[in-house]
Amino acid sequence: MANDLTQLSANELLALYRNKAASPVEVTQAVLARISNLQPHYNAYRAIDADAALVQAKASEVRWQRGAPQGVLDGIPAGFKDLLNVQGFPTRKGSLASPDKVQTEDSPVAARLRESGVIILGKTQTAEFGWKGLTETKLAGVTPNAWDRQYASGGSSGGAAVSAALGLGPLQIGTDGGGSIRQPASVNGVFGFKPTYGRVAGYPAAHNGTLFHIGPLTRTVTDAALLLNVIAAPDVRDWTSLPSDGRDWTANLNDGIKGLRIAYSLTLGYIKVDPGIAAIIDHAVARLTELGAIVEEVDPGFANPAPILEALAAERAIRLRRDIGDAGVALLDPGIRASLEKAEKHTLAEVVEANQRRGELAVQLRRFHQKYDLLVTPVTSQPVPHLGTAPEAPFLSPFNLTQQPAASIPAGFDVNGLPVGLHIVGAQYNDALVLRAARAFEAIQPFPALHLSSLREHAPAWALA
């Protein structure tokens, strides 16, 4: 039964708790056992506190026995990307330059989940300071793809995506400053959602400022919506956080997309896409028409915003150097150090100009969404690469600039048999519609869960038994 429990969604586990068919202790024990077995091969977690998790699980079990759960996610195990502070764990941010100091205060997202009774498993691996789309660091080593350990897991939320795919905790919290939730979600075959900026409060402030979104990586859309019910809340420590309207994000989740106007852009007008990826996304978009959506092939009409992002990287670079000092910079991955030094060469005038162009882009997309409810694109432009190379996902960062909600939903497999995601983008603040569209697609094209018996020949021998 232990392995079965690790394959269930949070929604399914909650139903078992309500019916007293399983307990939070059983579930937590099963997940911890699976982590223990898989961690040596996948390196998905940075740190685990099994004893503390079991104490929390026992307390949750008592609450469920009394019929008085503490919150809507009471007893569900969760992991947190190691860019986020969680009380009792160091925040190493994937870097030798970060102090090995135990945090005494939860970040807002950890605080909200702890208040809801979630079982805090530990911290998942991240790219160094979230800088790259690749979860391979000098501090923590390599986190490979959940489906084939010869291939990249992406990043920077690679540990969270791999954990979600492998059943190492049904709820995973990631961050996305340029695609860091959606890209690893795509290549590991899970659902990744970047809410509208400010929907989930953040503290301390991120190095990349208002590009930084916090959101779920899960194996189902419903689980992501349940998670949002808890974490979509303001916090006094984040002056940019949005007020809560008391919305139930699972409401109307199954209402479908009939009649919605959806723009489909295969290239955004400037991206070269592998023919195999294009075929998968074309097929996925055809499924949207089967669901009754009105789909039009159209580019949103903006130029490649890479120059904007390159100039804004100066702000991130200045904050990073301020926090870790020259001694810390010397410990960075050489590629990151080179990027940092390049970013610092931008002038104040260039940064001001980039912020103005960012605002113009946001206005352009707001006008675009007056006609189209949603925009869909690929997530990645090329097949998943081998270890050591970041998956190419140039479709994602424009929507960090504009702070729009966006998701990656599994859509098929590339030439190497690795997952490919469909990118669904909504107008700013219309997170609910993105979730609804993702759920409609999930319902018509369920994605196979990754079980130990389905792992590739490159997996360890025990996984092939």
Image (tube, rainbow, N blue to C red):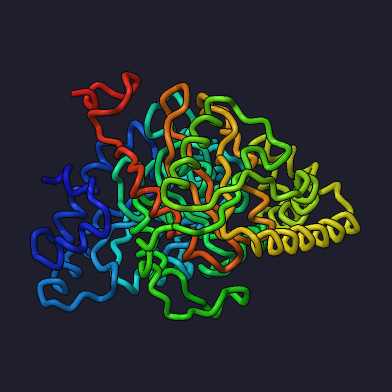
Pick whichever, 322 or 351, lies toward us.
Answer: 351
Q: Left or right: where does residue 257 sit relative to residue 375?
A: left
Q: Is residue 198 left or right of residue 159?
A: right
Question: Residue 31, how many percent across, how many down?
Answer: 23, 48
Q: Residue at x 72, y 40 (%)?
A: 269
Whether residue 8 is visible here, answered yes or no, is yes
Who's the residue at 21% across and 54% down the image? 28
At 56% from the left edge and 75% from the top edge, which residue is drawn? 242
Using the image, determine if residue 408 lies above or below residue 242.
Answer: above
* Snapshot quadrant of residue 373: bottom right
**Where 234 falls versus 195 (above or below)?**
below
- Residue at the farthest top position: 457
Res 449 quadrant in image = top left
- Where is the N terminus found, in terms of image quarters? top left
- Residue at the (57%, 25%) spot, across then down: 275
Q: Nearer the viewer, residue 301 or 340?
A: 301
Residue 346, x across and y down, in percent: 86, 49
Q: Quadrant of the C terminus?
A: top left
Does residue 100 appear anywhere in the picture? no
Residue 417 appears left or right of 330: left
Residue 187 percent location from the top left of the image: 47, 36
